[in-house]
Image (cartoon, rainbow, N blue to C red):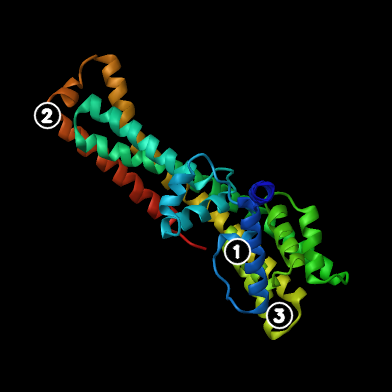
Amino acid sequence: MVFVIFIGSALLTFGIVVILLRPTPDQKALDKRLATLKASEDGSVGRTLDLDLYLKTLKRGSFGWLEDLVSGSAFARKLQLLIVQSDSPTAVGTVMAQCLGLAAALGGTAAMITYNAIVAVPLALLGAYLPLAILSIKRSKRIAAFNKALPECIDIIGRSLRAGHSLVGAISIVADQVPEPARTEFSEVYKKQNYGLPFRDALLQMLDRVPSQDLRVLITGILVQKDTGGNLVDILDRILFVIKERMRIHGEIKIQTAQGRMTGWILCALPIVMLVLINIVNPGYSNVLFTDPLGKKMLYAGVGMLILGGIIIRKIVNGIEV
């Protein structure tokens, strides 16, 4: 009996120790990233847009079960990439919950007020798109801030190379001197290269996180020089000149298209402003648009054409690429 009690106590103690010392989800994710990095360094796997390579744990919020539903799908990976590119602290499950909640709130409210699916469905779709639109705006602002700091980064790299520093050393200097978000991105490149990730992969991953055309030109020039040889300082000087000229031309285009953008805003806002002003001067003037079935159809058609016209004007104005 004593022997049985001893064996049982030992097994119970061993089980408790195993449970308490089991690896946490963060430790498992870290082991997976390190294993992937080692395999990439050995050449057994090629470059892939795997977010585990970013050495940055994506936050898992209170809606992890939503992430599990779409885990491994193209939608989940695109949403993860959008979160990384916008540098948002949110999680995939949280964004999905926001989309579903806003869609249900706007669509349900419109359905209870209008009892019309033609109004409720577009509002539900708009609510579902709003969190994604906010992330897209954050991404655009972040890329714009990065592009603004990129010429200074290239200039510092060129001057550091002239002073005798290596390319990796020049990138570490950039990571200490430039403003955000360029500071964080170049610091990530320097850290990953020190962790053992191939320099080429570290640069390409930065391009995944910051999908900037100017950065693509810089990385292409650096990688081509590493493969074919040449004077990297001269290459950087030429890239810097091209980027500055591109920014100058882009600014001129924004000036030339300012009238078109203003026209689009005025044409889209004018019907709404006039509707409000007319009803202030003559209350009840437009009640027929909200009560009569034909008036409702005309109102829906007018709103739809306003949105379509605004989209067309935006595409025309913003469709000029430099």
Where is residue 46 drawn, in percent x and y?
Answer: 57, 76
Q: Name the residue under label 3.
A: 226
For this rendering, which residue is in front, 267 or 156? 156
Front disc: 3 or 2: 3
Binning the other alpha carbons within 10 Å of mark 2 as few (below 14), some (14 to 19) or many (20 upward) gives: few
- Residue drawn 33% across and 34% down? 104
For this rendering, which residue is in front, 162 or 282? 162
Front disc: 1 or 2: 1
| Spatial separation of the CA atoms under disc 1 and disc 2 | 53 Å
Picture layout, residue 242 above or below residue 286 = below
- Residue drawn 57% across and 45% down? 88
Where is residue 255 drawn, in percent x and y?
Answer: 52, 49
Disc 1 marks a residue whose amino acid type is: Leu
Q: Name the residue under label 2.
A: 293
Could you tell me if residue 299 is visible in this image?
A: yes
Q: Mark 1 points at which residue?
A: 207
Where is residue 280 drawn, in percent x and y?
Answer: 30, 16
Picture layout, residue 96 above or below residue 277 = below
* Mark 1 or mark 2, earlier in chain: 1
Q: In which quarter of the image is residue 234?
A: bottom right
Could you tell me if residue 259 is visible in this image?
A: no
Horizontal arrangement in the rendering, residue 320 relative to residue 202 (left or right) = left
